[in-house]
Image: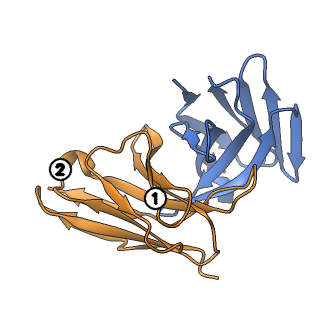
Amino acid sequence: GEDVEQSLFLSVREGDSSVINCTYTDSSSTYLYWYKQEPGAGLQLLTYIFSNMDMKQDQRLTVLLNKKDKHLSLRIADTQTGDSAIYFCAERSGGYNKLIFGAGTRLAVHP
Amino acid sequence: NAGVTQTPKFRVLKTGQSMTLLCAQDMNHEYMYWYRQDPGMGLRLIHYSVGEGTTAKGEVPDGYNVSRLKKQNFLLGLESAAPSQTSVYFCASRPTGTGNEQFFGPGTRLTVL
């Protein structure tokens, strides 16, 4: 079945770049998403990439997609303390835009 | 617009009790979803609806029922709560069209003793 895997924890220094990685299994996924969850809140869409793209850049965020290896990454440039949150990778799988989520990567930003 | 709202925010139940979680959206979205979030497991889809009057099972539907009598509301019911249903429940909605994001509510934290 479909599966999405992420590392559970990442710690970076403020001002450095953060790279969060994700692997997925459904090669027919058309869209892949990155969501951000701050403490006590729901999920908020950060960005998404269509499967025919290799890269997407949006201000401090860069998404890289390696479709051959089914690998997705999110790079956050100049990471700030406000970026501390849990980041979820998700693939669109099957009909009706059902999303399969990874377990989430907790990003901790320290001074 | 209030977006997606969930009621209640917190609830504690005893095993065997029943309750209904309410999700409401004011964006005229067709699709609505119920997820549960457990530590280290990400979000798992319980049930979803592709329109008023329709529902379908997701990945983990057992022990839950849903209803979508009005387009703006999606109800999740627990008929006989079990400790394994202790979780944070998120509702989401999205409009029709490919690639459209799901908009999430703030969540309901449920504890079953």
Hey, which residue is sitting farthest top in the picture?
Answer: A68
Query: Where A58 sits versus B4, above or below?
Result: above
Q: Mark 1 packing: few (<14 Cα in 10 Å), some, or many (20+)?
A: many
Please provide percent x and percent y for residue A81: 66, 56
Residue topped by disc 1: B90
Residue most extreme to the front: B53
Using the rendered image of the protein, determine whether residue A58 is visible from the camera's viewpoint: yes
How far from the left and from the top, in percent, is residue B74?
Answer: 44, 67
Q: Which chain is blue?
A: A
Is A105 or B31 nearer to us in this picture?
Answer: B31
Please give the name of the residue rendered at 68% of the width and 45% of the height, measured from the top-left corner: A34
Chain of residue at mark 2: B
Q: Is residue B46 shown left or right of residue A10?
A: left
Secondary structure state at the residue bearing disc 1: strand
Q: Residue lying furthest bottom in this view?
A: B1
- Tell me which chain appears orange: B
Q: Amino acid at mark 2?
A: Ala
Q: Callout 2: few (<14), some (14-19), or many (20+) C-alpha neighbours within 10 Å?
A: some
Q: Position of residue A63 (x, y in %)?
A: 81, 39
Residue A101 position within the rendered picture, expressed as x and y whole percent measured from the top left? 55, 40
Q: State the residue position of label 2.
A: B82
